[in-house]
């Protein structure tokens, strides 16, 4: 990497001469340097800088190599002054005047000042920002922040803000990242992406679980079978009014984690998240990797209840039977007149009757109304008898 090349250059830059302590500057963009009390001048890609010089990054970035795998990276808007280091430390001591600096050290600490605040980083990387307040955020390793006689350790994935000299908070807060920030993406990109995936699953599971569900110990033992081997687990450990999705993700991280006892992990996981840490940072803080964590959560979601709110299929309603049709009423019709004053109703069309007479004439009347049929048939029989007597 770049720091290895710069380390070799450092041996030459620090070899002595009348210029005093020095460091090696590598430029990727436009950087201006002011030597001594002079004015700023744009420099080439590489340059040795000395105590008393000032640097300003106008475009791109720059790396200041301090030797022994210690370096300070600067970006657009950063301004830094080179001062003589303290005995036993780096030959030069950078002082951040404005903007941001990324401090990296493999073993021996690298130290940068920012007004009344001094930040020392070892075994990792930390971002130092100076504007209305000084903010030190640790990506990995550990950082120590001191100001006006007060000091505070800042573990990985935490940060502190110092608004004025000596005003250190009682404890660090979770690291606040910006997904579009190039340093955050480089050093936390996987955790940022994982955090987005876990947040989406948390919201989905909360919507999937019905009202009143997800509030018992047995429910989460069913969702995460690994909890069956944790006899101390109780849903009360999660705190009141915890959304089911938040509980599921936090418990999955707890189960996959290996740092401390189960009870210690529960407190650490939910405590860090409740302080404001995104789920991706919580997983990284517990040393949990992506694949097994997402696998456990997805399996739990598959076991969980389905609902329309979660996007699952709505239950199919039973088929609706058509309403019963009222009985069909035949229209009234006036039958042949019967006895005087009698009105007879019946079907509009009488059923067809077979021809029962040898000559093919009409047979007995059969309208379906006995009174009518008897009267008509009697008249017909009478007429037939008279016609027969006349020889017709």
Image (cartoon, rainbow, N blue to C red):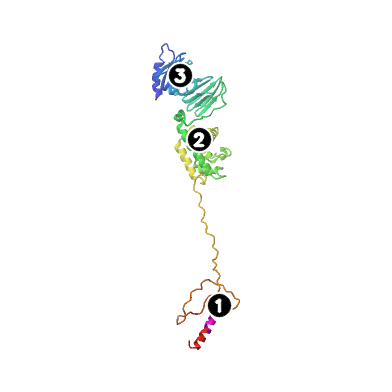
Residue 210 covered by magenta stretch: no
Q: Is residue 12 visible?
A: yes
The magenta segment is 371-382
**Residue plotted at (45% across, 32% down):** 189
Pick the residue in front: 146 or 80. 80
Callouts 3 and 2 close, C-beta under 8 Å: no
| Residue position marked by numbered label 3 in the rendering | 55
Task: Classify 344 as above or below 26.
Answer: below
Write down the quadrant of residue 43 in the picture. Answer: top left
Contact between labelled residues 1 and 2, with CB atoms less than 8 Å apart? no
Q: Nearer the viewer, residue 295 or 322?
A: 322
Q: Nearer the viewer, mark 3 or mark 2?
A: 3
Q: Is residue 378 magenta?
A: yes
Residue 328: image location, x then y, percent = 54, 66
**Along the polypeptide, which appears first: circle 2 or circle 1?**
2
Say whether marks 1 and 3 touch (CB < 8 Å): no
Report if residue 255 is visible in the image.
Answer: no
- Residue that badge 1 annotates: 372
Secondary structure beneath label 3: strand
Tag 2 residue: 279
Cα distance, mark 2 to mark 1? 94 Å
Marks 3/2: CA distance? 38 Å
């Amino acid at each position: 990497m770049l720091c290895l090349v710069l380390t070799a250059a450092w041996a030459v830059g620090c070899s002595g001469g009348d210029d005093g302590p020095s460091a090696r500057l590598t430029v990727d963009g436009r950087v201006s340097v002011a030597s001594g009390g002079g004015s700023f001048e744009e420099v080439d890609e590489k340059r040795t800088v000395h105590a008393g010089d000032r640097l300003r990054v106008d475009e791109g970035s720059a790396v200041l190599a301090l030797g022994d795998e210690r370096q300070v990276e600067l970006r657009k808007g950063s301004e830094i002054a080179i001062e003589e280091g303290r005995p036993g430390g780096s030959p030069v001591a950078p002082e951040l005047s404005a903007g941001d600096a990324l401090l990296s050290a493999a073993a021996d600490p690298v130290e940068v000042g920012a007004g009344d605040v001094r930040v020392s980083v070892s075994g990792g990387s930390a971002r130092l920002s100076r504007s209305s307040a000084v903010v030190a955020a640790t990506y990995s390793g550990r950082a120590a922040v001191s100001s006006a006689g007060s000091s505070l350790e800042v573990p990985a994935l935490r940060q502190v803000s110092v608004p004025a000299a000596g005003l250190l908070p009682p404890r660090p807060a979770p690291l606040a990242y910006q997904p579009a920030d190039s340093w955050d993406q480089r050093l936390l990109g996987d955790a940022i992406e994982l955090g987005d995936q876990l947040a989406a699953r948390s919201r989905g599971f909360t919507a999937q679980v019905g009202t009143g569900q997800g509030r018992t110990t047995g429910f989460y033992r069913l969702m995460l079978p690994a909890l069956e081997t944790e006899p101390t687990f109780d849903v009360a450990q999660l705190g009141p009014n915890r959304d089911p999705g938040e509980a599921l993700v936090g418990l999955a991280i707890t189960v996959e984690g290996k740092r401390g006892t189960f009870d210690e992990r529960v407190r650490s996981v939910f405590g860090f998240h409740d302080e404001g840490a995104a789920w991706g940072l919580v997983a990284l803080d517990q040393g949990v990797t992506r694949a097994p964590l997402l696998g456990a959560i997805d399996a739990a979601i598959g076991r969980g209840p389905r609902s329309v709110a979660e996007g699952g299929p709505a239950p199919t309603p039973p088929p609706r039977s058509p309403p019963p049709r009222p009985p069909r009423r035949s229209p009234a019709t006036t039958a042949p007149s019967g006895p005087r004053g009698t009105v007879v109703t019946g079907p509009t069309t009488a059923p067809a009757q077979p021809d029962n007479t040898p000559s093919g004439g009409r047979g007995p009347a059969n309208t379906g109304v006995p009174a009518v049929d008897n009267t008509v048939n009697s008249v017909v029989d009478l007429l037939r008898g008279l016609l027969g007597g006349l020889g017709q």
